[in-house]
Image (tube, rainbow, N blue to C red):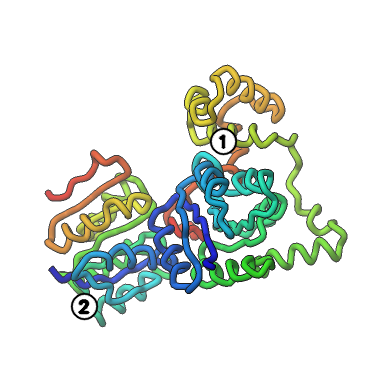
Amino acid sequence: MKLRILLADDHEIVRRGLCALLQKHEGWEVIGECSDGRDAVEKAKQLKPDVVILDIGMPNLNGLDATRQLMQHDPNFKVIVLTITDSDQVIREALDAGARGFVLKSDAARDLVSAVEALQHRRMFFTPRVNDLVLAGFLDKGRAISATEPPTLPTLTAREREITQLLAEGKSSKEVASLLNLSTKTVETHRSNIMRKLSFHSIRDLVVYAIKNNIIQIDMPVGAKNGSPAA
Amino acid sequence: MTIRILVVDDHPIVRQGLRTLLEGRSGWEVIGEASDGMEAIEKAGQLNPDVMVLDVTMPRMNGLEACRVIRRSSPSLEILFVTQHDSPQMMREALDAGARGYVVKSNAARDLLEAVEAVSQHRQFTALNQRDSVSPSL
């Protein structure tokens, strides 16, 4: 029986590359492709894949929040996140969201097959840096991790994070309402709650917050080397 | 029509995606890959491709610098940029460097084949993110 994989990345050219890589592996089948996190969550619920591969930086719903939603729906989902950075904060969020695999996009050609194989055999797959961080946290009973934690802000609910992403992407309350099947009034109430919780006074503050907290990701300027295959 | 193509991008997974797309067209052949500007110059000299699909942001030497060098060393080779930079300024810089075409990476799956076809016939092809900004020939 084939291993059924669902793949989500907002760049079609990257999806094609990933599909070509995965489909070279006998016994694996890419059963669906998605270009945003919201679609990925819906398709995963419908298709019940064995492994879900989610890019973190996707529009409408990022890969971390998509992972949270999937794990909330069914904790047996096996999720690998693809990321352009293995910063402490992203690692912590990915682990916290319930991802069992963590692969840098720049290393996907080398690591993704190993990651899928690991999850197929009920193991986890992380980059060496994730392993180091987890080990440091274990040895120091959490002190090593908490020492690098950014100052905490009030926690947003899953719905508030979704709305934060959409607003930070430049969508109006009406557009957000339409995407989430809510009334505009409900979205505006959420928006007020978010701004109050975070003590923000402008949408600019919210955009900066969304970037700093990996809710949205931005393209790097030319010459600034990052790990994004979109660069 | 046979077109021999060199694909240049620092991310293997993107090169694989571009290769898959390009080799879906009958008669087109990806004859090589490079992962930075220096390697692109080297392979352009060795392999003599018809078209180079070139990224902008790469380590060691970026695509714009490589394009300027290749323009002088291989004047008949046509260069098509495939980049994340959805910017008229960057597009202008690419054309000034000697490229024949410019496609935004997020739309590559839509525009790439048409762009390669155009530049292989020495026609300019530029497409930013808005479909109405496409100018297949000038």
Question: Residue A4 in the image: x percent, y percent?
Answer: 53, 61
Give the amino acid type for the residue marked by disc 1 in the picture: Val
Say which residue appears at 49% left-offset and 52% top-offset: A8
Is residue B88 depicted above or below B5 in this figure? above
Q: Is residue A217 visible?
A: no
Say which residue appears at 65% left-offset and 70% top-offset: A121
Give the amino acid type for the residue marked by disc 2 in the picture: Asn
Q: Is residue A30 visible?
A: yes
Say which residue appears at 41% left-offset and 67% top-offset: A20
Q: Quadrant of residue B50?
A: bottom left
Pointer 1 and pointer 2 on the same chain: no
Mark 1 falls on what kind of element? helix
Mark 2 falls on what kind of element? loop
Is residue B10 depicted above or below A8 in this figure? below
Which numbered circle lies on residue B48?
A: 2
Q: Circle 1 is placed at which residue position? A: A207
Given residues A207 and A29, the one toward you in this image is: A29
Q: Quadrant of residue A167?
A: top right
Given residues A182 and B4, the one toward you in this image is: A182
